[in-house]
C-alpha cells in the first residue's frame, strides 16, 4: 500500500476540508466581502462618483471596479490561506498532516489551491455585484482571468507563508491590515497614478500593488499606469518570490516540525 | 544486578534469539530540541509484528518524542527508524500509510462532524473513500450514534474515541497510542483495552506509551522502560516480573515482638505491623531464598507464628526501583 507519485486522495481531502470550512462560514467568507464592496459602490460610485469627472474616458464608478476586486483578492487570499494552515498549528491537529503520506508540495497545493479557489469565486461574485451598480466593460477577458488567477494564487501562497510564520492570531492580521490594505489604497485602487503630483508618482512606483492593480485594470479598460508587460513581470516576480520562500520552508521544516 | 539487566536489554536490542518477524527497527535514535534540551539518546529498539509493546516511563522521559519521530512529526537528530527495512524518512510515502497515530492531547477539529473528520483522515493517508470501513470503525468505537455531531459537543472520552477512529480510518498495520488512557474513566479504559486486544487479533502491531504500570501489566506482551531519554530495559512482561521481581514472605506472629531479634540481623527481614509481622524479602530466582533459614531460626528462638504468605512485587515497584536507580547518580531529581 503506497500513495504513489501523487497522493491525489490526500490533496483532495485537504482541499475539500478547506472548501467545506468556507461554506460553513459563508457569511464571513462571501457575504461580508460582497456587502462591503457594495458599500464602496454606493459611496464612491453613486454618491461621490456622480459628482466626479470621468477618469480617462471611464466613469469613476466603473473605474474603481478592478481596484476593488484586487483589494478583495489580496485580503481574502491572505486571510484564507494564512488561517487555513495556522489553525491546525493552533489546535494541534497539524500532527495528522505531518504524519500523513503527503509531501509539503501537496500540502501547499491543497491549501493554496483551496484559498485561491475561494478568492477567485469571490472576485467573480464582486464583479457580478459591480455590474448591478455600474456598467463594466472587459476588453481583454483572457488577460483579466490570467491576472485574476495569478494574483489569487500568489497572495494565497503569501498567506500560506504568513500562516506558517505566525505565532498568534494578531500576527495573522499584521500583514493584511498594516501592509497590504494601505499599499492597495495608495497603489491606485481608487485613482489613476496620473492624478498624483509628479513627485508622488515617482514614489508610488515603489509600491508593488501599483503594478498588480494597473495590469488588472488594463484588462478591463485598456488603460494602465504602467505598461502591461511590466505589470505581468511584477506579478510573476512576486509569485516566484513566494515559491522560493515556500521551498525554503519545505527544506528547513521551518516552524512546522521540531 | 545492574550488569545483568544491561545484558538482558542488550540481547533484546539486538533481537537475537527468538525474534521472529521484526516490523519496526530503531537504531541509535537521538533527539536534541532547538532549545538544547536532549530528549532521546541512543535508543535501539525492535518491535515484533503483531505484538503489543508498552513503552513505560515517567512524564518527560521521551516517550512522546520517540513516537513522534517514528510518525514523522519530529525530526531525529541522529539515528534511523525503519519499517520492514524501509527508512521512515526516505520512504515516508510507502511507510506512513501503514502507520496510525493516536496522540496524547485531544487535538480535534472542533467544528467538524465525527463522520467528516474520520473520512478526512482516510483520504489524507491516500486511500479511496470507503464508507463501509468508516462505518465499521465508528461502530466498533461506539461512535456511530454520534457521527453527525460536531466534535466540540463531545465529551473528552468521546473525543479520544474520535482520535482513535481517525487513526484507524486508513487501516494501519502499526498503531501508536500515546497515553491512550490518560484522564479517561474506568469504563472507557476497559473498552480501550478490549479494542487493543481486538486489533492485535486482527494482526495489528500496537505500541502504546503509558505511565500507568497497571496498563502495561494488563495489556503488553513486552515492556520497554524509558527514563531520561534512554531506553533502559526491554523485556517480555512475564520475564520482567519474574526476573526482576522480588518476593516477600510475610510471617504472622502469635505474639508481637518488641524489636527484631539480633539473630535475624543477617537476613533481609523487617518487623512490621507494630511487631505482629515479619517480612522477608528474597529473590525468587535465587537458589537460596532464605526461607528455610528464617523458619529454622524462628523455631530456635521459640518464636511462634500463625500464618505464612508470599507475594510477588508488581511492575510498579520494579519500575520505581529501576527509575530511581537510574536517576540517583545523576542528581536530585526524583522520578514521579
Image (cartoon, rainbow, N blue to C red):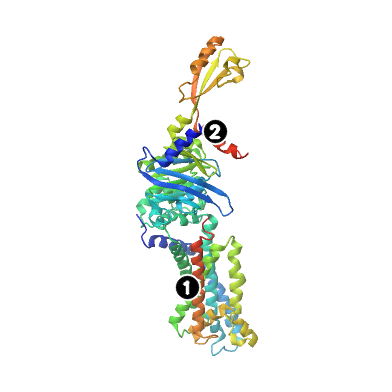
Q: Residues within 10 Å of mark 1 (few under 14, many from 20)?
A: many
Please tell me the numbered disc located at residue B321.
Answer: 2
Q: So how many labels did they put on this image? A: 2
| Residue A136 at least partly seen | no
The alpha-carbon separation of the residues under discs 2 and 1 comes to 64 Å
**Percent x, y of residue B76:** 49, 52
| Residue A246 at least partly seen | yes
- Same subunit, labels 2 and 1: the answer reads no
**Percent x, y of residue A47:** 60, 82
**Percent x, y of residue B156:** 52, 46
**Percent x, y of residue A116:** 47, 70
* Residue to which mark 1 is pinned: A120
Q: Residues within 10 Å of mark 2 (few under 14, many from 20)?
A: few
Q: Is residue B291 above or below residue A188?
A: above
Left or right, B217 with reference to A2: right
Q: Is residue B190 above or below residue B174?
A: above
Please tell me the numbered disc located at residue B108.
Answer: none
- The image quarter containing residue B142 is top left
Classify the position of the N terminus of chain A by image quarter.
Answer: bottom left
Secondary structure beneath label 2:
helix
Q: Chain of mark 1?
A: A
Amino acid at each position: 500500500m503506497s500513495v504513489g507519485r501523487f497522493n491525489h486522495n490526500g490533496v483532495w481531502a485537504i482541499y475539500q476540508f478547506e472548501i467545506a470550512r468556507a461554506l460553513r462560514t459563508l457569511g464571513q467568507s462571501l457575504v461580508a466581502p460582497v456587502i462591503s464592496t457594495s458599500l464602496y459602490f454606493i459611496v464612491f460610485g453613486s454618491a461621490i462618483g456622480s459628482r466626479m469627472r470621468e477618469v480617462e474616458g471611464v466613469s469613476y464608478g466603473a473605474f474603481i471596479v478592478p481596484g476593488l476586486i484586487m483589494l478583495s483578492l489580496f485580503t481574502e487570499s491572505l486571510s484564507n490561506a494564512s488561517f487555513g494552515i495556522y489553525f491546525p498549528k493552533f489546535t494541534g491537529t497539524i500532527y495528522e498532516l505531518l504524519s500523513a503520506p503527503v509531501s509539503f508540495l501537496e500540502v501547499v497545493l491543497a491549501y493554496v489551491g483551496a484559498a485561491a479557489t475561494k478568492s477567485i469565486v469571490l472576485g467573480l461574485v464582486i464583479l457580478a455585484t459591480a455590474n448591478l451598480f455600474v456598467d463594466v466593460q472587459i476588453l481583454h477577458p483572457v488577460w483579466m482571468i490570467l491576472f485574476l488567477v495569478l494574483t489569487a494564487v500568489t497572495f494565497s501562497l503569501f498567506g500560506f507563508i504568513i500562516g506558517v510564520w505566525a505565532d498568534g492570531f494578531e500576527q495573522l492580521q499584521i500583514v493584511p491590515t498594516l501592509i497590504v490594505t494601505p499599499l492597495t489604497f495608495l497603489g491606485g485602487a481608487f485613482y489613476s497614478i496620473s492624478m498624483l503630483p509628479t513627485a508622488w508618482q515617482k514614489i508610488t512606483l515603489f509600491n508593488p500593488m501599483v503594478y498588480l492593480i494597473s495590469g488588472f485594470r488594463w484588462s478591463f479598460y485598456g488603460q494602465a499606469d504602467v505598461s502591461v508587460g511590466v505589470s505581468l513581470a511584477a506579478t510573476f516576480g512576486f509569485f516566484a518570490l513566494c515559491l522560493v520562500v515556500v521551498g525554503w520552508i519545505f527544506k528547513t521544516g521551518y516552524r512546522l516540525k521540531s | 544486578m545492574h550488569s545483568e539487566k544491561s545484558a538482558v536489554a542488550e540481547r533484546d536490542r539486538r533481537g537475537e534469539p527468538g525474534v521472529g518477524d521484526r516490523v519496526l527497527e530503531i537504531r541509535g535514535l537521538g533527539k536534541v530540541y532547538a532549545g538544547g534540551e536532549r530528549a532521546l539518546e541512543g535508543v535501539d529498539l525492535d518491535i515484533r509484528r503483531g505484538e503489543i509493546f508498552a513503552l513505560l516511563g515517567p512524564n518527560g522521559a521521551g516517550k512522546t518524542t520517540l513516537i513522534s519521530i517514528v510518525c514523522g512529526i519530529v525530526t531525529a537528530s541522529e539515528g534511523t527508524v525503519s519499517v520492514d527495512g524501509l527508512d521512515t524518512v526516505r520512504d515516508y510515502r510507502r511507510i506512513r500509510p501503514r502507520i496510525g497515530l493516536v496522540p496524547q492531547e485531544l487535538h480535534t477539529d472542533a467544528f467538524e462532524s465525527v463522520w467528516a473528520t474520520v473520512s478526512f483522515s482516510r483520504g489524507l493517508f491516500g486511500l479511496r473513500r470507503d464508507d463501509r470501513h468508516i462505518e465499521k470503525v465508528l461502530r466498533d468505537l461506539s461512535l456511530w450514534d454520534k457521527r453527525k455531531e460536531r466534535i466540540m459537543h463531545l465529551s473528552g472520552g468521546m473525543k479520544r474515541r474520535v482520535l482513535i477512529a481517525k487513526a484507524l480510518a486508513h487501516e494501519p498495520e502499526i498503531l501508536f497510542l500515546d497515553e491512550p488512557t490518560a484522564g479517561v474513566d474506568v469504563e472507557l479504559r476497559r473498552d480501550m483495552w478490549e479494542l487493543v486486544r481486538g486489533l492485535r487479533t486482527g494482526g495489528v502491531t500496537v505500541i502504546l506509551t503509558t505511565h500507568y504500570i497497571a496498563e502495561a501489566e494488563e495489556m503488553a506482551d513486552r515492556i520497554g522502560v524509558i527514563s531520561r531519554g534512554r531506553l533502559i530495559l526491554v523485556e517480555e512482561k512475564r520475564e520482567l516480573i519474574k526476573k526482576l521481581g522480588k518476593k516477600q514472605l510475610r510471617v504472622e506472629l502469635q505474639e508481637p515482638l518488641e524489636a527484631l531479634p539480633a539473630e535475624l540481623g543477617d537476613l533481609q527481614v523487617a518487623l512490621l505491623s507494630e511487631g505482629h509481622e515479619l517480612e522477608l524479602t528474597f529473590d525468587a530466582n535465587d537458589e537460596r531464598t532464605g526461607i528455610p533459614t528464617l523458619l529454622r531460626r524462628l523455631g530456635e528462638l521459640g518464636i511462634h507464628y500463625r500464618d505464612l504468605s508470599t507475594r510477588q512485587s508488581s511492575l510498579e515497584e520494579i519500575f520505581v526501583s529501576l527509575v530511581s536507580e537510574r536517576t540517583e547518580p545523576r542528581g536530585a531529581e526524583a522520578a514521579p
